[in-house]
Amino acid sequence: MDDPLVIADREFGSRLITGTGGAANLSILERALIASGTELTTVAMRRVDAEGGTGVFDLLRRHGIEALPNTAGCRTAAEAVLTAQLAREALETNWIKLEVVADEDTLLPDPVELLDAAEQLVDQGFVVLAYTNDDPVLALKLEEVGCAAVMPLGSPIGTGLGIRNPHNIEMIVSRASVPIILDAGIGTASDAALAMELGCSAVLLATAVTRAQDPERMAIAMRSAVEGGRLASQAGRIPQRFWAQASSPGKPMG
Amino acid sequence: MNVVINGDAREVAADATLASVLQDFGVAERGVAVAVDGAVVPRASWPDTALRPGATIEVLTAVQGG
């Protein structure tokens, strides 16, 4: 595998992690997931009689896409830990996308509950991928308590506002020794490319694809953008200059 | 006695086990997990798990999200 994404010793060929929320139906979701090339996709845990359908797990299994359960909807560390334990039991995986949000308006992570939950889950043997604010201090603390990946937001969930503080993302990446995955806020392909150019190891997105007018086409766009951004970050961009610099030498007439 | 399963109260036999209640509820063979009073009960322990009156049972599965 050329240039794999490595999380907790697992290798993935694709650096695009997708969510499954927001799709109008399962067949649209299925086409988008296949087009995206993703190998790892989040699912939520809900009561069996709740709305939202239960066919998603079968769909992922059919296509060999790994299911990454999340703790979406949890407000406290206690809720998130119980949800993770239930996910481990139901899906037979010890991987968890940890999400503890503070309120419905912002859906921003609650840093106190998040760190508490992360510590407990790591102690219980979970591979924790923590959804967090774009806060370089908190990101490092999550790594220190043993998270396998840290996932700062670009902007609040579902806003499509892109990366509001690229400098923070760069700071987080510059001192991380676990993968940094840009999670939340991606609106279009250039946002995903920017995340990779800033040095992120991967991008996690859902709404940008599932609620696009043409989800399948947007999935292809995101796949290309992540690949392009990754290549650009490795290639080493030219420095920015104030004045122009001719790319052709001299003049035609001497 | 009464227990609460996914938010709904139901009447069950006084000697009901978690396994019998879940069978009546119609729980799938795979892909679900159960908590009783806030603690996960592994599938293998369902037949041996007695319920107290008023027990709160949560049955969860994976759905689209995130």
Image (cartoon, coloured by chain):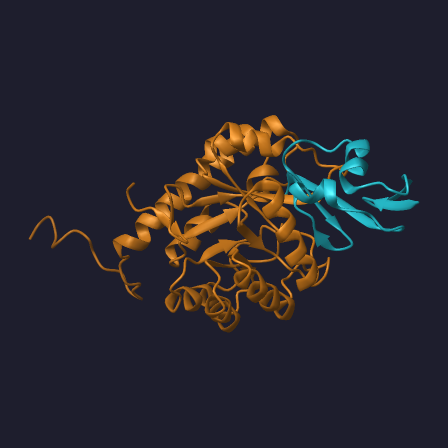
Chain colours: A orange, B cyan
As drawn, B30 above or below A236: above
Camera-side residue of A173 and A55: A55
**Residue B44 location, quadrant:** top right
Q: Is residue A4 visible?
A: yes
Q: Of residues A210 and B14, which is closer to you in this image?
A: B14
Q: From the viewer's perspective, is A10 left or right of B10? A: left
The structure residue drawn at horizontal position 70% and vertical position 58%, both measured from the top left corner, is: A79
Residue B39: image location, x then y, percent? 71, 54
User: The N terminus of chain A appears in which quarter of the rendering?
Assistant: top left
Q: Is residue A164 above or below residue A235?
A: below
- Image label count: 0
**Residue visible at 55% across and 39% down in the picture:** A209
Q: Nearer the viewer, residue B17 or B24?
A: B17
Q: Position of residue A217 (x, y in %)?
A: 50, 32
Determine the residue positioned at 61% across, 68% down.
A116
The residue drawn where x is 69% and y is 31% is: B28
Left-right relation of A73 to A37? right
From this view, report whether residue A241 is shown above or below residue A31.
below
Q: Specify whether B64 is left or right of A196.
A: right
Q: Which residue is at the far bottom?
A: A137
Q: From the top left corner, tell me how far across and down residue A198 is, in percent.
A: 39, 59
User: x, y percentage for residue A203?
Assistant: 46, 50
In this rendering, does residue A185 appear at all?
Answer: no
